[in-house]
Image: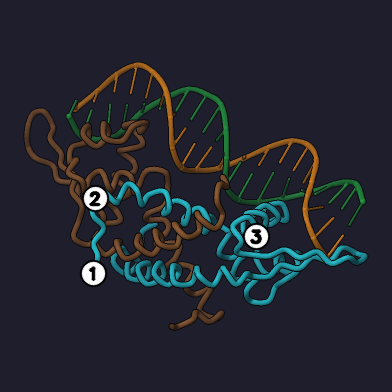
Chain colours: A cyan, B brown, C green, D orange
DNA sequence: CTGGATCCGGGACGATACTG
DNA sequence: CAGTATCGTCCCGGATCCAG
C-alpha cells in the first residue's frame, strides 16, 4: 500500500493543513453534527450545544460556510428566519472522519488516560 | 460504504479529537517529517525547520513522544547526546495522513485561494 | 549540545448586553 | 429570531537569556 515517500511529505503538508483547518477547533465538528442531526435554526443549534456562545457559534458557522460544509439560507420573513443545512459536498468528509475515528480509537487505547 | 449514522457521530467525536490533537498544530507534522528524514539530533531538527525556536521544539517533541510517534533516546556522553527517531507505531498514521491529503487537495481546489 | 526559565503579545474563547 | 458589540480571560507560541 502506497507509502508516502519523503519528497512527497513536504508537498503533502499544505493540503493536510487545509484539511485540518477545515475541521479542527473546539466546536466545528460539534456544530456540523448538530446541523446534520436536524438542528437547522441558529437558536436551535445554540441550544443543542451546551456551553457555546452566540458569538462563537456565528463565527464558526461562517467558517463552515466558507468551507462549503454548511449552507446558509435566508428566508424573507419577520422575524428573521435563517436555515442552516449540511451540503452534499460535506459528505466527502466522512471518509476522512472515519479514518480519524479509527486511528483515534486505537490511539486512545494505546495512550490510555493521557491529557 | 458504511455511512456514519448520527448516533455514532457524537460517540466518534472523542477519538476524532484525540487523533486531531496528536497531529494538529503548527509544527508537529513538520517535526515529524524532519525526524523521519533523518534529522535525529535536537539542533539538527531545529536547523532543518526555519523559524522554530528551541523552546517550542522541545515542547512539541515532548508531546510527540507522549503520543509515541517519536522516540527519545539519551546516550551517556559528554556533552549531552540525545537522539530522536520515529516509532514503528507512527507508521499507522500514514493512512490517516493520506486521507487528509487526498481530501485536502481536492478541498483546496474547491475553495481556491481562501485564507 | 540539550533544553529550561522568563517575559510577552496576539488570538481563541467566553459572558453579557444590545440591535433589527 | 438571528446575530453584533464590547469587554475580559486564558493560553499558545515567539524572543531572549541561561543552566547542566
Q: Are marks 3 and 1 in contact (CB under 8 Å)?
A: no
Q: Quadrant of residue B19?
A: bottom left
Q: What mark, if any, has residue A1 been given in the picture?
A: 1
Q: Earlier in the sequence, mark 3 or mark 2?
A: 2
Q: Position of residue A99 (x, y in %)?
A: 39, 69
Measure how far apart labels 3 and 1 are at the Cα level: 43 Å
Query: Looking at the image, which is closer to me, C14 or A32?
Result: A32
Residue in the image at 28% along x and 48% along y: B32
Q: Quadrant of residue B92?
A: bottom left
Q: Inspect this view and state whether residue B73 appears.
A: yes
Q: Are marks 2 and 1 in contact (CB under 8 Å)?
A: no
Number of other residues with Cα within 10 Å of mark 2, as a class: few under 14, some 14 to 19, many 20 or more: few
Q: What mark, if any, has residue A6 been given in the picture?
A: 2
Left or right position of B15 against B74? right
Q: Which residue is mark 3?
A: A51
Q: Position of residue A24 (x, y in %)?
A: 50, 56
Q: Earlier in the sequence, mark 2 or mark 1?
A: 1
Q: Secondary structure at mark 2?
A: helix
Q: Position of residue A44 (x, y in %)?
A: 74, 69
Q: Inspect this view and state whether residue A24 appears.
A: no
Q: What mark, if any, has residue A47 been given in the picture?
A: none
Q: Secondary structure at mark 3?
A: loop
Residue in the image at 42% along x and 58% along y: B20
Left or right position of B4 against A75? left
Measure how far apart labels 3 and 2 are at the Cα level: 42 Å
Q: In the picture shown, does residue A76 fall above or below B81?
A: below
Q: Chain of mark 3?
A: A
Select label 3 or label 1 by which is in front.
1
Q: Chain of mark 1?
A: A
Amino acid at each position: 500500500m502506497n507509502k508516502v515517500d519523503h519528497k512527497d511529505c513536504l508537498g503533502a503538508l499544505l493540503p493536510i493543513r487545509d484539511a485540518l483547518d477545515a475541521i479542527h477547533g473546539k466546536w466545528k465538528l460539534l456544530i456540523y453534527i448538530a446541523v446534520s442531526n436536524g438542528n437547522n435554526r441558529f437558536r436551535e443549534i445554540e441550544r443543542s450545544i451546551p456551553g457555546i456562545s452566540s458569538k462563537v457559534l456565528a463565527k464558526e458557522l461562517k467558517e463552515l460556510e466558507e468551507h462549503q460544509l454548511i449552507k446558509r439560507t435566508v428566508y424573507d420573513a419577520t422575524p428573521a428566519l435563517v436555515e442552516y443545512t449540511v451540503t452534499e459536498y460535506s459528505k466527502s468528509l466522512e471518509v476522512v472522519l472515519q479514518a480519524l475515528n479509527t486511528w483515534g480509537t486505537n490511539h486512545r487505547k494505546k495512550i490510555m488516560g493521557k491529557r
